[in-house]
Image (cartoon, helix red, strand yellow):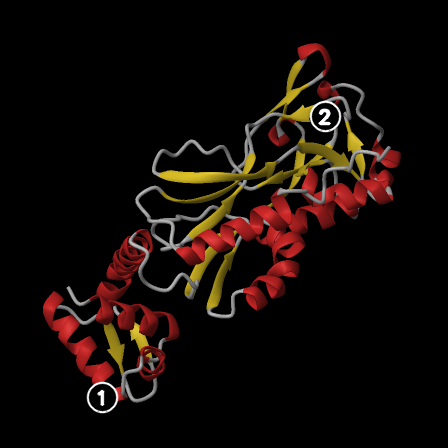
Amino acid sequence: MDTLSLRLFVLAAERLNISAAGRELGFAPAASSARLAKLEHEFGADLLHRSTRKVSLSVEGEEFLPFAREILAQEDAAKAAMGRGSARPRGTLRFAASSTFAQLYIAPILPKFLKQYPDVDLDLRLSDSRFDLIEGSFDLALRNTPLDDTSFKGRKLADDTRILCAAPEYLEAFGVPEQPEDLSRHQLIAFRDHGARPLMGPNGAQASFDPKAGRCRLTVDDGISQKLATLAGAGISYNSLWSVHQELRAGTLCRVLPDYRIEDGSILWLIYPKTNVLSIKVRVFLDFLLSEIGRNPPWIPKAPQG
């Protein structure tokens, strides 16, 4: 198989521009079109739809794209192992993450990464809803759930401590819960598709935070919206410490049942499919996030000096 034509296809799929993809590889427009046509003939399917105005992926092209990327990653890894090829990371990296976490911690540090690696482009897919890593052809993803899927490998970025909190105005109006049982008499904010969560208290005490057990008047699927509603006094919600630590420090949010914490096994993982070779571009981005965020997570209080 002509891997150079595969590179041309992957670049054309990412750029949606065959001429631009060809120029990046040193091909004239006619040569680029001829190579892609030969590749399509080999597979017996149109991988790209072309018109005078635009280029788009066909259904077959979308299905083939992750396999093409994997073949190229394998080739790059083999060359690197033999001391051949360019060690300089390049290409487009597709990264999926929680939009809430990305807004707070990833977006602000991206200029530093892009400056450090000028030949790497980032394609970010951000959502607080669940996503399919394999179907989305992502190179790397951030998840804040237990890593219980054996089809993935992962590196721990940081702990994900989850707590209950509410606005001081809400607690003043509705009272402060003293025991987990008191939550059933409060307005609770639920995150979509999340059920009851175990609460661990002092001396091994166990309870649960179940929005359905109280008066759940608000359900959301976006972490920022949940935090804003909590700040506005809509009720009690559970949040990751990384999301609300600044508000807790400023006093605009208060911990509810401070002796309890949600224990659902959540950890911030950087994951990728187990079958994928960890390409140079993925490795440098993963190491960058571990260095910039994981080494000293901003939401964890620093130990006093001296």
Residue linked to disc 1: 30
Return the residue found at the far right. Answer: 172
Going 32% across and 77% down the picture, which residue do you hit?
25
Question: What's under tag 2, amino acid-wise?
Answer: Leu
Quadrant housing the C terminus = top right
Question: Which mark identifies residue 183?
Answer: 2
- For residue 109, side relative to residue 15 (left or right): right
Going 31% across and 82% down the picture, which residue do you hit?
26
Going 20% across and 76% down the picture, which residue do you hit?
36
Question: What's under tag 1, amino acid-wise?
Answer: Ala
Closer to us: 297 or 79: 79
| Residue 159, image quadrant | top right
Q: What is the distance, in whole Å, between disc 1 and disc 2 at their CAs?
A: 68 Å
Residue 166 visible somewhere in the drawing: yes
Quadrant housing the N terminus = bottom left
Percent x, y for residue 176? 83, 27
* Secondary structure state at the residue bearing disc 2: helix
- Mark found first going from the N terminus, 1 or 2: 1
Question: Which mark identifies residue 235?
Answer: none
Percent x, y for residue 188? 69, 35
- For residue 96, side relative to residue 199 (left or right): left
Question: Which dot, 1 or 2, sits closer to the camera?
Answer: 1
Q: Residues within 10 Å of mark 1 (few under 14, many from 20)?
A: few
Do residues under tags 1 and 2 come within 8 Å of each other at their CB atoms?
A: no
Closer to us: 28 or 178: 28
Percent x, y for residue 244? 73, 43
Q: Tell me: residue 52, above or below residue 292.
A: below
Q: Residues within 10 Å of mark 2 (few under 14, many from 20)?
A: many
